[in-house]
């Protein structure tokens, strides 16, 4: 699953990479950039690394398709140079404007390094709202963002993970870096997987194996009737009997023919008064005890 996410075949619109101080996810983020620039235009919004550091990490790659937006040199706007992408400019209008300034015919990919810096100066609801607006704006096809989960409260990280369509949580393991992958499908089904991987010098991701406690992919629907105290399922004989049971509101062929028959044999209701009937034409209610 990690290979498919890296090469963008099924990553969804928001891919979140969670790391910590014990295991950095920045090289994995660079691997996504390397895989994306082969066919896509990539915009990199970086607050934690300078453009030179990013290019050094991505050395050997063609940068014709990469547009760097400097959020590192003056993130708070103290120098007032005007060219840096300050953190207060992180809104859907500003990001969309910068993306559309580059000549391109189709939506681009936005890489954010990292959301943790933005969350230091914007509230969690504001960041989530901006990401949702970027999704609806049409200028971006995918967003790949790095998040340092150990710098935030559990509720903040959980909100962003709930918003993301794919989440990769990296951690250091005894045999290499371990990736816990959660992917949400459009149908609402959630897939989970675990992999051990290494990243080569050319940023190629090599999948080694699955850890011994790997979570299997949840490719089957949960049965809501599994733990009930009564049986809701029908046997084959019960199902056949149910299908043969005539419904009261469904007319049979015989009933339809009888209702539609307008011939001489049509039934009539006639009333013949009884000899003991006491019916006064002038006072029809005389027999009522009122």
Image: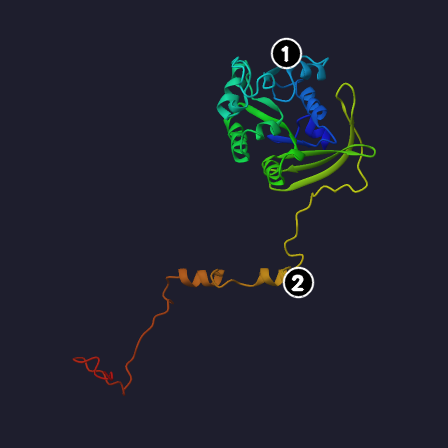
Residue 28 seen by the camera: yes
Few, some or many residues within 10 Å of mark 1 (<14, 14–19, 20+): few
Residue 64's disc is 1
* Pointer 2 residue: 237
Is the residue 241 above or below the residue 127 in the image? below
Q: Earlier in the sequence, mark 2 or mark 1?
A: 1
Nearer-the-camera pick, 124 or 178: 124
Q: Quadrant of residue 281?
A: bottom left
Q: Quadrant of the C terminus?
A: bottom left
Horizontal placement of 92 versus 17: left or right? Answer: left
Looking at the image, what colour scheme do you see? rainbow
Q: Residue furthest right?
A: 175
Nearer-the-camera pick, 257 or 9: 9
Residue 11 seen by the camera: no
Point 65% across, 41% down: residue: 190
In three-dimensional space, the C-alpha distance between marks 2 and 1, rounded to whole angstroms, equals 68 Å
Point 74% across, 30% down: residue: 23
Nearer-the-camera pick, 266 or 271: 271
């Amino acid at each position: 699953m990690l290979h498919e996410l890296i090469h963008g075949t099924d990553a969804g619109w928001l891919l979140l990479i969670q790391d910590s101080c014990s295991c950095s996810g920045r090289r994995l983020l660079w691997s996504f950039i390397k895989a994306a620039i082969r066919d896509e235009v990539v915009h990199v919004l970086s607050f934690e690394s300078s453009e030179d550091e990013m290019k050094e990490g991505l050395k050997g790659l063609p940068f014709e398709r990469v547009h760097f937006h400097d959020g590192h040199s003056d993130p708070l706007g103290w120098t007032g140079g005007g060219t840096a992408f300050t953190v207060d400019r992180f809104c859907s209008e500003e990001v969309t404007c910068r993306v559309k300034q580059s000549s391109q015919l189709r939506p681009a990919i936005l890489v954010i390094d990292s959301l943790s810096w933005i969350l230091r100066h914007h509230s969690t609801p504001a960041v989530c709202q901006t990401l949702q607006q970027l999704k609806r704006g049409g200028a971006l096809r995918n967003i790949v963002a790095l998040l340092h989960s150990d710098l935030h409260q559990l509720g903040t990280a959980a909100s962003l993970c709930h918003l993301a369509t794919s989440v990769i949580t990296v951690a250091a393991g005894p045999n290499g870096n371990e990736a816990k992958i959660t992917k949400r499908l459009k149908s609402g089904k959630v897939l989970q997987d675990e992999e051990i991987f290494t990243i080569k010098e050319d940023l190629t991701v090599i999948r080694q194996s699955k850890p011994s406690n790997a979570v299997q992919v949840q490719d089957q629907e949960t049965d809501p009737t599994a733990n009930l105290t009564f049986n809701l399922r029908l046997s084959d004989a019960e199902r056949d009997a149910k299908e043969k049971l005539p419904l009261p509101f469904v007319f049979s062929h015989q009933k339809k023919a009888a209702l539609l028959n307008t011939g001489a044999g049509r039934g009539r209701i006639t009333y013949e008064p009884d000899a003991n009937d006491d019916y006064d034409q002038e006072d029809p209610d005389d027999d009522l005890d009122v």
